[in-house]
Structures are given as C-alpha cells and as structure tokens.
Image: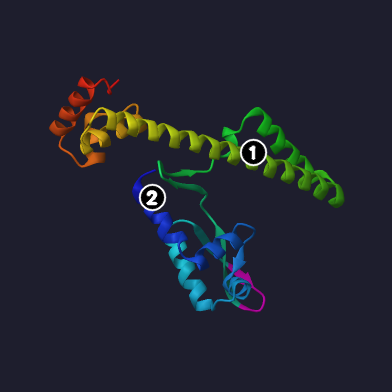
Amino acid sequence: MSSTDIDELFYLLENPTRRRILQLLSREQLYTLQMSREIDVSQQAVVKHLRILEEHGFVASRDEPSDRGPNRRVYRSARSVSLHIDVGPSTFLEQVAPHSDSSQLSDEQRRVLSAISEARSMEPTARMDLLARVGEDLRYSLQGLERERQQLLALVGELNCEVGRCSRRAECSYDERRMLHHIMQNPSYTIEGASAALGLREAQVRTLLEGLEQRGLNR
C-alpha cells in the first residue's frame, strides 16, 4: 500500500476515541448509546467519530427495527488491516497490509479453523473449553512470530549500518548514499521508480548509478 494509505491510517488511529470505538466493534455490533456509555463520551462525539470511520470504510451501519420506537442504527467493524512502523537508529520501516482471508491459510492453519468450526456442534462447556485452548495456542504462536520479527529487525539494522559504513569508506556523496540505500531496499528497482522515490531526475539517477558502479557498490 502507498504512503497515502499509511497517512490515512495515522489520521484515523491517532485519536484515542476512534481506537476505542474500533476495539469495541471488533467484538460485536453496537449502538451509539452502548458505545457512549462504554467509553464515557457523549453520543454526539461518538456519532462524529463513527461518521469519519464510516467514510474511510472502517465501519458500516444499518437501521435495525426497535420495539421501543424509531429504528436504531447499529454499527459494525468493516475493514481489516495491519500497520507496522519500526523506527531505530539504523531502521525505518512502514507497512500497511490487509489481513489474509481463510483461502490463504496453510494446511496447519486450516486444521485450526476446522477445530473452531467443530466447536459449534458441542455443548456449551466443551465448546468454550476448546475455544479457550485454541485461543491460547494462537496467542502463543503470535508471540513467537513477534519475537522472530524483532530479531529480524535487529539484523536489518545491522545490515543498514554496514551499508552506511561501505558508502562512507568509498567516500560517496549524500545522493549516492541515498541511491545505495534505495537499491538495497528495492532489489527490483527501476530508474523511473528511483527517480520518483528520491525526488531526482532520471539523468541524475543514472549518473549516481554509474558512480556507485565505479566504486564497486552497484550489483
């Protein structure tokens, strides 16, 4: 996804009330009054934030008949994304990606999905016991993946440091160093893409690549 998508997410998620609303709706559909009471914010404020979230596709709503008067509007979560921002002395990575659906699961993950489906036919106690055990396994797996991700990010930082050392030893100019980092982060780069990413003319990009090649820094 583009930087525009990341900027949109930051705009939506920087507000703690909107984050709280999304957290509530991730569990179940709710009315504005329910959300207002839960997060201790006026209904008017909740409606304002819901309107923003709905405009950006994160929330959907529909009218639901009420036996106590006019129809009530019920809201649900409508969009799934993952946002990663990693910042460090030698690392800056930002990524937005949609969540995978069940068609992209591995065989092992499909077995987990089958276990969740099987729970529907169980009596309540056995059902909740199975779901609790599956939930614990999933949390453990996610924690393991996050530990591995952090270790990989540490290696990315070391790699970026070494690229910087190579460029300084070769006495590269500032733009040459920028070009070198772009090459390392985008193995399938193009002249046009590098030009747009670095804000340079294509002729300048070619000159920079020639300079890096002369120093033995361009693969």
Residue 123: within the magenta? no
Residue pictured at 13% horizontal, 31% vertical: 203
**Position of residue 30 measured from the top left corner of the image (x, y, whole percent):** 61, 66
Residue pictured at 40% horizontal, 41% vertical: 90
**Position of residue 98 measured from the top left corner of the image (x, y, whole percent):** 49, 44
Residue 148 is drawn in which quadrant? top right
Kind of residue at disc 2: Asp
The nearer-to-camera label among 2 and 1 is 1
Report the residue marked by disc 1.
144
Residue 71 lies left or right of residue 153; in this view the side is: right
Residue 80's disc is none
Residue 186 visible? The answer is no
Residue pictured at 59% horizontal, 41% vertical: 146
Mark 2 → mark 1, Cα distance in angstroms = 28 Å
* Applied colour scheme: rainbow
Q: Quadrant of the C terminus?
A: top left
* Disc 2 crowd, CA 10 A, few/some/many (<14, 14-19, 20+): some
**Position of residue 40 measured from the top left corner of the image (x, y, whole percent):** 59, 76
Report the residue marked by disc 2.
5
Q: Quadrant of the N terminus?
A: top left
Q: Earlier in the sequence, mark 2 or mark 1?
A: 2
Q: Which residues are magenta?
A: 64-69
**Position of residue 134 measured from the top left corner of the image (x, y, whole percent):** 74, 42
